[in-house]
Amino acid sequence: MLDIVLSALYLRGATRPADLRRSAWPDVVRSLRRASCSVGDAPEALREAGLWAEALVLESPNLLSWASEQVARGRALTAADAEYPARWLRVLGGSAPPALWRQGEFPALPCVSVVGSRLVPVSVSRFCVEIAEEAVRLGFAVVSGRAEGCDRSASRGARLGRGFLVEILPHGIDLARATGSECLLSVCPPSEPFS
C-alpha cells in the first residue's frame, strides 16, 4: 500500500493538481504506518496527521489507479520497497528520492558504485572497466550512471564480467533499454530527454 501512495504522490510524470514537498515523504510513511489503513483510507489518515496537501492530491481522480498500475507493472521503486537501497535511506534520509521509475529487477546482491569524471585518460577508463569486472567476480552488482567517461566504463566492465548492473539515468527510462541483468532507475518521467 505504501508503494502505491508514494508513487501516486511523488513519481514524476503523474498528473497532479499540485506539486508536493518531496521532503514530506517520511511523514507520509510514518502516518500511514501508524494508521495501518488501506489505500482507499490513506487520504483520511493523511488529513488526520495534518498532511492536508498530500491528502488532497491523493484524492485526485484516477491517481491511485494510475499509481497501482505502475507498481503492478514493476515500473516504480519507492522508499517503502524492500529492494530500495537502505544506504540511501540511512545517508540521505528525507532527501532520498521517495519514488523512482524502474525498468528491470533491482539485484538482491550487495552493490558497489563506480562513478567519476567524464573526460578521463584511457588508463582511468581501463581501470573503471577492470574494477567493475572485479566487483562482479566478487559477487557485487555494479551501480553507475550513463555519463561518458568513468560511468560508461564501469557499465562496460559489469557487462563484460556478465554481472548485474544498475544504471541511474539522467533521462527517462523509456529512452533506454535494460538487458536481462540490468536495472535502470530514473527520477525523470519515462520519456523525458536529458537536459
Image (cartoon, rainbow, N blue to C red):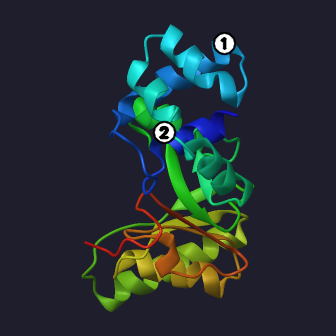
For the residues marked 1 and 2, what is the alpha-carbon distance in whole angstroms?
Answer: 18 Å
Q: Is residue 38 left or right of residue 166?
A: right
Quarter of the figure with the N terminus: top right
Circle number at residue 2:
none
> Quick one: 114 or 189, which is closer to the camera?
189
In this view, the residue farthest toward the bottom is 122
> Quick one: 169 or 124, which is closer to the camera?
169
Circle number at residue 9:
2
Q: Residues within 10 Å of mark 2 (few under 14, many from 20)?
A: many
Secondary structure at badge 1 equals helix
In this view, the residue farthest toward the front is 61
Q: Residue at x 38, y 36 (%)?
A: 22
Q: Residue at x 62, y 78 (%)?
A: 178
Chain-order first, disc 1 or disc 2: 2
Find residue 30 and report its horizontal and vertical position in percent: 57, 18
Tell me if residue 80 can be seen.
no
Find residue 94 and report its horizontal and vertical position in percent: 42, 30
Residue type at the position of mark 2: Leu
Circle number at residue 35:
1
Q: Residue at x 48, y 24 (%)?
A: 55
Tell me if residue 17 can be seen.
yes
Residue type at the position of mark 1: Ala
